[in-house]
Amino acid sequence: MTVQSKKPEINGTRTGYVIRFTCPSCAAENIIINRSPRDHFKERRDANCSKCRQRSTILTPYATPKRTMYSQSPKGWGTLR
C-alpha cells in the first residue's frame, strides 16, 4: 500500500476571475486564472508554485454559501425564522 502525501492547504484571495495565493515555502505570489464559470465556483483546486514548483491545495473563500438548518432562503443567511 502506498502512502499518499498530504499537500498543504493554502487560503486563496479572490480578485475578480483571478485567485491569488502565496507559497508557504518560498513566499512567492502566484495566481490562478479562472477560464470558465465552473472553475470560478470551485471550493478547492490543486496548483503549483511558479518559482519552486511545490504542489499545494488552494482553498477558495466564499465559493458557494452553505445552507444551515437556520437559514431557509438566500435573503436571510444565518437568521432564525
Image (tube, rainbow, N blue to C red):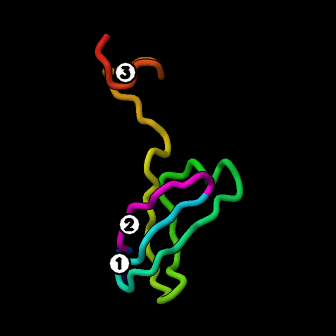
Q: Residue at x 49, y 46 (%)?
A: 63
Indicate the secondary structure of the residue bearing disc 1: loop
Q: Is residue 76 above or below residue 60?
A: above
Please rate how many residues cluster around mark 1, counting C-alpha atoms within 10 Å: few if below 14, some from 14 to 19, many from 20. some
Give the residue pinned by disc 2: 10
Left or right: 80 in relation to 35: left
Give the residue pinned by disc 1: 24
The answer for how far apart the CA atoms under marks 2 and 1 are is: 8 Å
Indicate the secondary structure of the residue bearing disc 3: loop
Q: Residue at x 35, y 74 (%)?
A: 6
Q: Indicate the position of residue 34 as horizontal and vertical percent values.
A: 65, 59
The answer for how far apart the CA atoms under marks 3 and 1 are is: 36 Å
Amino acid under disc 3: Ser
Give the residue pinned by disc 3: 71
Q: Indicate the position of residue 74 as horizontal and vertical percent values.
A: 48, 22
First along the sequence among labels 3 and 1: 1
Are the residues flagged by discs 3 and 1 in contact, CB closer than 8 Å? Answer: no
First along the sequence among labels 2 and 1: 2
Please state the extent of the stretch shown in magenta in the rendering: 8-17
